[in-house]
């Protein structure tokens, strides 16, 4: 069964490997450029001593050179990529079998249909986990210089560094598997899976995530030093940061007399909570698909 599963999904595996290689080449080229610029402008020393307040020009130059490309352009390209990967792979597990009628042969063998589906799901999900983890490592390495300025809590970094990228892929995979079972068509299942995937991501990201844990409070704003056009605030690059620590996630407007924020040290706790939500949803979706296949045979 494992060999059969590999044969059925090998083209997708090769495509995923090609995608990973392209991402690695892009990340290597841009990552080396950012590291060179970061070192040339002595930003590491400046951030360590003054959180960037003593070298606003160097921070501004670095952000002008790479900020739009790394924080906006790259993020825009990858915005739907985890959902597309999971949806394309997941829709073929049952949708293709039912659409092409090959389920009559696959489900009439000595291997029970429920066991056939469970093995298929386990093999494909394992491949997606490996792909997601590899993509996360590449993106984390490539973004490292920019993360020294922004931290990991900004949307551009948080969604692709840690556990959640793989969890996003698995969630889209689970949706597509179930929709493939219900719609019996591959392309409609892909499209149908993307809609709730985007909706859930937006709800979790903007409404639920900031409140995973009780925010900390600052009674008043940290005194800020402004030089030129660079000053503390809530932008992607704030010099110095509003809370006095790079990477904190602001929950309230920095102009408010009281600041609520999530400290940067909670990054992995937040990642674990959010990834756990998506993995639980994925297991529920896949469990439903397995139950429907089992019920179909009774």
Image (spheres, rainbow, N blue to C red):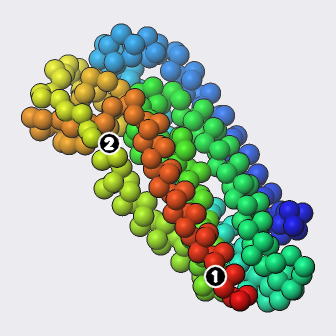
- Mark 2 in CB contact with mark 1 (< 8 angstroms): no
The residue nearer to you, when weighing 267 against 198, is 267
| Residue 150 seen by the camera | no
Disc ID at residue 37: none
Crowd tier of the residue under label 2, counting other residues whose Cα lies within 10 Å: few below 14, some 14–19, many 20 or above: few
User: Quadrant where the C terminus lies?
Assistant: bottom right
Q: Picture coordinates of residue 21 (x, y %)?
A: 74, 45
Query: Label 2, label 1: how many angstroms apart (C-alpha)?
Result: 37 Å
Quick check: 88 above or below 215?
Answer: below
Query: Which residue is located at x 60 percent, y 85 percent?
Result: 182
Depth check: 153 or 60 in front? 153
Percent position (x, y) of residue 218?
17, 29
* Quarter of the figure with the N terminus: bottom right
Q: To which residue does mark 1 refer?
A: 292
Q: x%, y% of residue 98?
A: 73, 86
Q: Is residue 298 left or right of residue 255?
A: right
Category of crowding for the residue at label 1, using alpha-carbon neighbours closer than 10 angstroms: few (below 14), some (14–19), many (at least 20) = some
Residue drawn where x is 31% and y is 36% of the image: 262
Any mark on residue 213, and which?
2
Q: Is residue 43 left or right of residue 165?
A: left
- Residue 121: quarter of image: bottom right
Task: Determine the image quadrant of residue 105.
Answer: bottom right
Q: Find residue 72 and report its horizontal and vertical position in percent.
A: 44, 46
Q: Nearer the viewer, mark 2 or mark 1?
A: 1
Question: At 39% from the left edge and 20% from the top edge, which residue is drawn?
Answer: 58
Q: Is residue 112 above or below residue 129?
A: below
Residue 213 visible to the viewer: yes
Q: Secondary structure at mark 2?
A: loop
């Amino acid at each position: 069964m494992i060999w059969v599963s590999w044969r059925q999904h090998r083209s997708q595996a090769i495509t995923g490997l090609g995608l990973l290689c392209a991402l690695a080449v892009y990340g290597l080229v841009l990552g080396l450029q950012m590291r060179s610029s970061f070192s040339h402008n002595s930003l590491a020393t400046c951030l360590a001593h003054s959180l960037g307040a003593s070298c606003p020009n160097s921070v501004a130059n670095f952000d002008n050179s790479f900020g739009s490309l790394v924080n906006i352009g790259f993020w825009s390209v990858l915005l739907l990529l985890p959902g597309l990967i999971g949806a394309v792979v997941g829709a073929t597990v049952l949708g293709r079998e039912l659409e092409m009628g090959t389920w009559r042969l696959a489900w009439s063998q000595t291997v029970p249909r429920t066991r056939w589906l469970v093995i298929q799901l386990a093999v494909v999900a394992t491949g997606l986990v490996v792909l997601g983890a590899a993509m996360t490592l590449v993106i984390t390495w490539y973004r490292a210089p920019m993360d020294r300025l922004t931290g990991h809590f900004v949307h551009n970094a948080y969604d692709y560094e840690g556990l959640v990228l793989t969890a996003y892929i698995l969630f889209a995979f689970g949706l597509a598997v179930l929709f493939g079972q219900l719609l019996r068509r591959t392309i409609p299942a892909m499209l149908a899976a993307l809609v709730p995937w985007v909706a859930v991501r937006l709800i979790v990201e903007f409404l639920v995530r900031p409140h995973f844990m009780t925010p900390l409070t600052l009674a008043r704003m940290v005194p800020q030093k402004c030089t030129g056009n660079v000053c503390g605030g809530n932008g992607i690059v704030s010099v110095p940061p509003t809370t006095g620590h790079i990477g904190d996630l602001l929950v309230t407007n920095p102009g408010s007399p009281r600041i609520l924020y999530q400290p940067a040290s909670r990054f992995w706790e937040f990642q674990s909570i959010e990834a756990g939500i998506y993995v639980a949803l994925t297991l529920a979706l896949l469990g439903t698909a397995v139950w429907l296949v089992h019920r179909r045979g009774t």
